[in-house]
Amino acid sequence: AVCCAVIAVLIALVASSPTKGWSGRSLSLLDPTYASKYIPIIASVSEHQPPTWPSYFMDINVLAFLVPAGIIACFLPLSDASSFVVLYIATSVYFSGVMVRLMLVLAPAACITSGIALSQAFDVFTGSIKFQLTGASSNTEVDAAETSSSTAESQTNAVKTEKPEETAKNRPSRKSKKKEREHGEKPSTKAKAEKKRLLALPLESSVISLLLLVLLGAFY
């Protein structure tokens, strides 16, 4: 009964206030037009004015372009940490649009999401370079392995022809099973390699992109 009475009193106090219990500062954060309507002395301060688009580019510079890329990277895959980062950047962008001085709230969130975007970009470019460099050597090794296996199979076939007919009757079934397994495994490995090859970027473009990212970080 006491708890219900206290809750009823609190609800009555909140309902009786014109701002429903919110302070003027909180309402100016939630509603950017509140200060200009009801608190003109606060709206007259230059720091409390909403920022313009050039102020974003002047303050965070190239991070304005890297933040959307970082948000996309957070969704691949979406986890608890990445969802927290997305909510952090979304709320900081909203509050930074209320007044100019809250650009300080946006700066750390923009740095975090831009770092995620740069990390993903470096992973993609370095992975493509590694795949392109190791692709030629792996192809030569595969060709050598195929030739050695073919010569070994020819030698075993020649030896098996000299054996009695009874053993020859039992071996073809094993051979056919082995060939079926090999034919079933080879397409899957080939498909994986083909998929990796399609996802990999060309070597020249990857190197140029890495150099451009390094120059971007050096000049910023």
Image: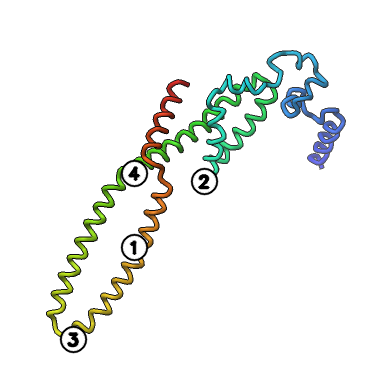
Between tags 3 and 4, which lies in front? 4
Q: Which amino acid does label 1 sit on?
A: Lys
In three-dimensional space, the C-alpha distance between marks 3 and 1, rounded to whole angstroms, equals 31 Å
Q: Is residue 106 above or below residue 122?
A: above
Q: Residue 56 carries which label?
A: none
Q: Residue at x 71, y 18 (%)?
A: 49
Which residue in the structure is indicated by mark 3? 166
Residue 70 at x, y percent in the picture = 53, 36
Q: Is residue 125 left or right of residue 11?
A: left
The residue that mark 2 highlights is: 77
Please give the residue where the numbered disc 1 appears in the rendered image.
186
Which residue is more in the foreground, 46 or 18? 46
Q: What residue type is labelled 2?
A: Pro
- Whether 145 is drawn above or below 15: the answer is below
* Quarter assignment of residue 60: top right
State if disc 4 and disc 2 touch (CB < 8 Å).
no
Q: Which residue is drawn at the image coordinates 78% and 14% (left, top)?
A: 41
Secondary structure of residue under mark 1: helix
Q: Mark 4 points at which residue?
A: 132
> Nearer the viewer's eye, disc 3 or disc 1?
1
